Amino acid sequence: MPGCWNAEGVARVHFAVLKLSGGSLKKFEDAVRLANIDCRDVLVFAGFADDIGAHKAWTPARTW
């Protein structure tokens, strides 16, 4: 996939998976599965698809 597997693209996918997980291991595993099928899907669902730097501005909510 163009844009997903260079260094910056991998970081975007990693952040998208973390965002989609919401702290849940089950949701994390589901997001990883989805990313392995098509990384663009997790970028879209996480809201990172339209802006190449959106993942850098995302700050996860602390649950502790």
Image: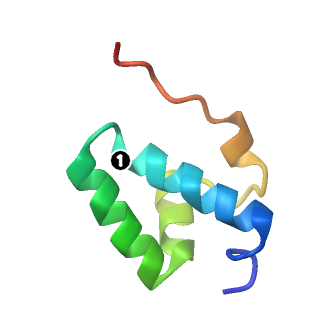
Q: Residue furthest left?
A: 26
Tell me if residue 38 can be seen: yes
Q: Is residue 29 left or right of residue 49?
A: left
Horizontal side of residue 49 vs 64, given as left or right: right
Return the residue at label 1: 21
Task: Examine the image and state in which quarter residue 31 appears.
Answer: bottom left
**Tell me, what colour scheme is on the image?**
rainbow
**Residue at x-position 56% and y-position 56%:** 14
In depth, the one of 7 and 59 nearer the eye is 7
Image quarter (top left, top right, bottom left or bottom right) of the C terminus: top left
Q: Position of residue 1 (x, y in %)?
A: 66, 86
| Amino acid type of the residue that numbered disc 1 sits on in the rendered structure | Ser
Which class describes the residues within 10 Å of circle 1: few (<14), some (14-19), or many (20+)? some
Q: Residue furthest top?
A: 64
Residue 23 picture quarter:
top left
Give the x, y percent position of residue 15: 57, 49
Q: Position of residue 44 (x, y in %)?
A: 54, 64
Is residue 31 rendered to the left or right of residue 5? left
Number of numbered discs on residues: 1
Residue 45 lies, with reference to residue 34, above or below; the image says above
Residue at 49% across, 72% down:
41
Query: In what element is the residue under mark 1?
Result: helix
Q: In percent of the image, x 40 and y 50: which residue is there?
A: 20
Give the residue drawn at x 72%, y 66%. Answer: 9
Quick check: can you spot residue 47? no
